[in-house]
Amino acid sequence: MTSKTLNLTLKVWRQKDARAKGKLVSYPIKGISTDASFLEMLDVLNEDLVQKGEDPIAFDHDCREGICGMCSLMIDGQAHGPDRETTTCQLHMRRFKDGQTIVIEPWRARAFPVIRDLVVDRMAFDRIIEAGGYTSVNVGNAQDGNCILIPKEKADRAMDAASCIGCGACVASCKNASAMLFTAAKISQLAELPQGEAEKHRRVLAMVAQMDAEGFGGCTNTYECEAACPAGISVDTIAQMNREYLGASLSDREEKELAGSG
Amino acid sequence: MSFDARVPPGPIDRKWTLCKNDLKLVSPTNKRKYDIIVVGTGLAGASAAASLAELGYNVKAFCFQDSGRRAHSIAAQGGINAAKNYQNDGDSVGRLFYDTIKGGDFRARESNVYRLAEVSASIIDQCVAQGVPFAREYGGTLANRTFGGVLVSRTFYARGQTGQQLLLGAYSSMARQIKKGKIKMYPRQEMLDLVVIDGVARGIITRDLVNGELQKHEGHAVLLCTGGYSNVFYLSTNAKGCNTTAIWRAYKRGAYFANPCFTQIHPTSIPVHGDYQSKLTLMSESLRNDGRVWVPKKKQDTRPAHAIPVEERDYYLERKYPTYGNMVPRDVASRNAKIVCDEGYGVGPTGQAVYLDFEDAIKRDGKEVIRQKYGNLFHMYEKITGENPYRAPMKIFPAPHYTMGGLWVDYHLESNLPGLFVLGEANFSDHGANRLGASALMQGLADGYFVIPYTLGNHLATAKLDKVTTHHPAFEEALNAVRGTIDRLLRINGTRSVESYHRELGRIMWNHCGMSRSESGLKDAIEKIRALREDFWKNVKVLGSHAEFNQDLERAGRLADFFELGELMCRDALDRKESCGGHFREESQTEENEAKRDDANYCYVSAWEYQGDNQVPKLHKEALNFEAVHLTQRSYK
């Protein structure tokens, strides 16, 4: 932990509220320790701004340990900044050079409207989960956990997909603002597990429909989402979702045809 | 005001069954006539909201985050305990109960703790059914690990992300009920007051954090599931938004605050590195399963760790506690780290750290096995410190982490204010003076999935609940009080930032009401807090207006409550002239400098009643009666 200090220029997106027109504003900032986190650097700037009587910069953050998914900054055009598998709150200033200019913007997507400055509304993600990202099991229904045997490999794959923190970096990094990786992560998790079996067709159809209804774009396989994902979710989940979707569509059609002929 | 814990009669292992038999039920068709307010969507809140909606109640759920999935339960890494005895190693409900009550240093209510152990196994089953990807063995069965303070393997886990996976399970159950229209979700809303009508909790006042609008919400019951108050220390492992405001405002409306001084200092956090630091990051205690804690035998030894030969290292936990070694409970591990650092054996640039070393484990099991167990934690450590723990030992130091104190509740999880229920970390009930690892997740979900669905029905079926609307004068009065506080904060327009006040309060609390407390230190702290608080209300600088997204205003309001809470914590610590669990009173120690409990004089729950601003609160005592266990001094030697 050999600590040095940096002098930087920040260009930060300022926007009063959802309707206001926003713009980038420059702030010089001095004496930032390389051991500070990116958000601690913004804390320092905000204290300076308050002292000067200027409105501090609004940004979302909470756990500051990389797990809650609340922080969400576009740093020099990269969601969560330059480090792989790292949220903004876990990005540290030792990653930057003295004298550097850093551009900080909010997530940009039609489905994620700006609330203020760097804060956006990500409730579209919640609505995708509400469409089917669960198993329909009431409290009191459950059998003993060991009655469902799940091979380690399958449990591990489910866990890989379940690691999604719902931050929205996949959407922000995608040129189409597609939410495929987010949606696919939940579908894959439940597709790997026997508990998800009963509702798998209904789930994938409903979640994909909701994703489209929210105004997210389509996937054109550029894999920016995977590169930006702080939880390391693989694009394999998207392939799995597409298989599930195809299977569900075919079976849906068969069921309709059977219902029609019967 | 009533102060009856309502512990059911009968032998301890029959109490919950007998209680459930006696509880009044609400008929299925009537459930839809009841509106239930749930504040907070962590494990306790999300599980309660989902379970109650499944039963047919109308639930309104509130959280200050942008989504119900982000509450700080998500950060719990290590695991969740359950008395499944899958390992055939002698575990049982009775043993989990005993470990928890002993771990809490006999300052928890026996009946509540037994119930917690009793429902623990069902929690795992429910979470598995939701699709929570717990770790599995090759044969497909659930895997377990061991955890600090116990001798059996009963902890279930999902990599280092157990809290996240359990919360996503509860959140998905909530999502299902939101879709069905049984839960109305209010994200980015903060509760700022409790509305009490004729002595019964009937609603809340909230602020919409996006546009600043104050709202009135009425209900037939209010559930506070708002977590703990470790952020009173400013630097803690809690998320930045965690606060005491909901329970503090309820306290000021008459709910008793129990054992406020019982806080937990977690032994394995990444050490402090600078003044600008905004939070402390925890490394899961499960690391102590394989890591060995040591400091150099020589004071102020500045050699790098690998250059210090084994015979010049003091593995002080293994030396002092040969039975438990590195697995002693959290309070013992934390206090010993502080002792060695205070004596000058600490490592790192500040001298405020000890080593947690995986060298032997890596030699024994290989790097790959260690990576599988702790990979994400090692990754996180390297991100934050820039050091690779596969090569050099981690540096760790204790950090405020969890608060065992909280609003007083009876066996039904109901506070002394009828209709106000408190679940999870926000209540005081299950962990006594110290919480064992992997028990917080268990308690949050036990309260939400398996206790409140029963006890809430009894309240609704038996209380006389006249129809009230938000036009009732009590709602107006509460709303005006909230508006008054906000306006007052914005009018000050002083010179000093909210954060700087919070840091100073944190330093006072850490120095005087942290790991070790003394009469003179606590008295000093009360004076300092009062002076700082007075200065805050004259000199704080909060910009902007109330009718907009204003994070500084949010923080200022929360800090105003932390000042008052901090003083109450010191008062409570002052009253308790014994050492117990996480509460170490310097005046009460054994000849070997271990904590000395005083059962003759302090075997009670302190329940504080608000008496008005700047008035000394009134102390009520709930005597703790132990029928099933015999009180012993804890020994982990």
Image (tube, coloured by chain):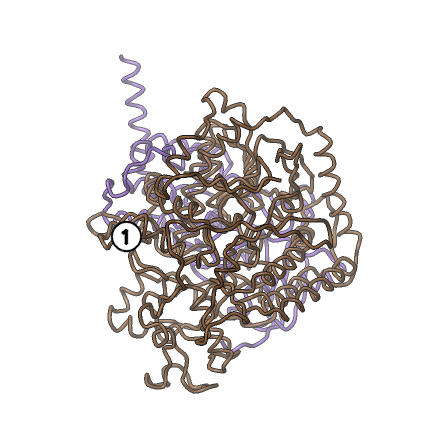
Chain colours: A purple, B brown
- Packing grade of label 1 (10 A; few <14, some 14-19, many >=20) is some
Which of B526 and B165 lies nearest the eye of the viewer?
B526
Residue A211 makes an appearance in the image: no
Which of B60 and B179 lies nearest the eye of the viewer?
B60
Q: In percent of the image, x 32 and y 31: which residue is there?
A: A248
Residue B591 makes an appearance in the image: yes
Location of residue B622 with respect to B533 vertically, above or below: above
- Dot 1 falls on which chain? B
Q: Quadrant of the N terminus of chain B?
A: top right
Location of residue B448 with respect to A99 vertically, above or below: above
- Residue B190: x, y in percent? 62, 44
Q: In percent of the image, x 27 and y 12: which residue is there?
A: A262
Q: Is residue B444 left or right of residue B557?
A: left
Which of A29 and B140 lies nearest the eye of the viewer?
B140
Q: In percent of the image, x 43 and y 47: which residue is there?
A: B443
In the picture of the structure, the residue carrying the numbered disc 1 is B91
Q: Is residue B268 left or right of residue B127?
A: right
- Which quarter of the figure has residue B538? bottom right
- Which quarter of the figure has residue B373? bottom left
Q: Quadrant of the C terminus of chain B?
A: bottom left
- Residue B120: x, y in percent? 36, 45
- Which quarter of the figure has residue A100? bottom right
Q: Is residue B298 left or right of residue A158?
A: right
- Residue B396: x, y in percent? 45, 71
Location of residue B279 with respect to A71 vertically, above or below: below
Q: Amino acid at mark 1?
A: Asp
Q: How many marks?
A: 1
Pick out the residue farthest to the top: A262
Pick out the residue farthest to the front: B600
Q: In percent of the image, x 46 and y 86: which residue is there?
A: B299
Tell me the SS state at disc 1.
loop
- Residue B557: x, y in percent? 68, 51
